[in-house]
Amino acid sequence: QQQVKQSPQSLIVQKGGISIINCAYENTAFDYFPWYQQFPGKGPALLIAIRPDVSEKKEGRFTISFNKSAKQFSLHIMDSQPGDSATYFCAAMGSNTGKLIFGQGTTLQVKP
Amino acid sequence: GAGVSQSPSNKVTEKGKDVELRCDPISGHTALYWYRQSLGQGLEFLIYFQGNSAPDKSGLPSDRFSAERTGGSVSTLTIQRTQQEDSAVYLCASSLAGVGETQYFGPGTRLLVL
């Protein structure tokens, strides 16, 4: 009920390509879905977030697609750059709790 | 300060010793969270403070772990009788309010239990 499953575990993309990371959740009480980016030695930083009343949200090169019926959401990074190389975590939060449930993370490497 | 700060940044201790980890949240943020990040378990929620409400301790892995938040600001996470499996990065986050708000993370404290 509390799990968030993330795939792939690692991803290698060429510069300029599209990076796609997928997450699936089980608990239908989740209503806030953020993505965090983490560089080595740093804490996670919010990248973009979505609520289930919309199916897509775009901020610059980053887009979240959300499929409520399938209980899935994904992060798309357009025109991927070497500076995007980091670990990405999806997460979910319920409406009556402040705690984030995180996916296992995806290590992205963008090759120049 | 500009962001969430944590101290110490690194801590090495011997098995069986107690450790205290400190978190200074962003000024004005009423909610404060502790998470643990380890290789095998990913990012795990530990505890959540919201204003004057009783904290949500549902993520604390054992009674060796405790946390307090004094004056609605600084928080201390205490691990008693540390074990090797406690080795991890302990992350603190804060948010302006609570539910559904963006959580801003500190850099973490890297704990190594020998």
Image (tube, coloured by chain):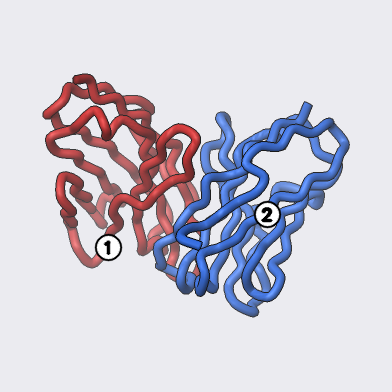
Name the foreground residue: A67 vs A57: A57
Residue B86 percent coordinates (x, y): 72, 37
Q: Amino acid at mark 2?
A: Arg
Q: Which residue is mark 1?
A: A52
Q: Quadrant of residue A104?
A: top left
Name the one closer to the observer, A1 or B108. B108
Q: Chain of mark 1?
A: A
Looking at the image, which residue is at 22% across and 52% down? A67
In the rendered image, what is the letter of the chain coloured red?
A
As rendered, which of B56 and A111 lies closer to the eye? A111
- Mark 1: which amino acid? Pro
Percent across and percent down for residue A23 are 33, 42
Chain B's colour is blue
Residue at 23 percent of width and 67 percent of height: A53
Left or right: residue A86 versus residue B69 is left
Marks 2, 1: nearer the viewer:
2
Q: CA distance from mark 2 to mark 1?
A: 35 Å
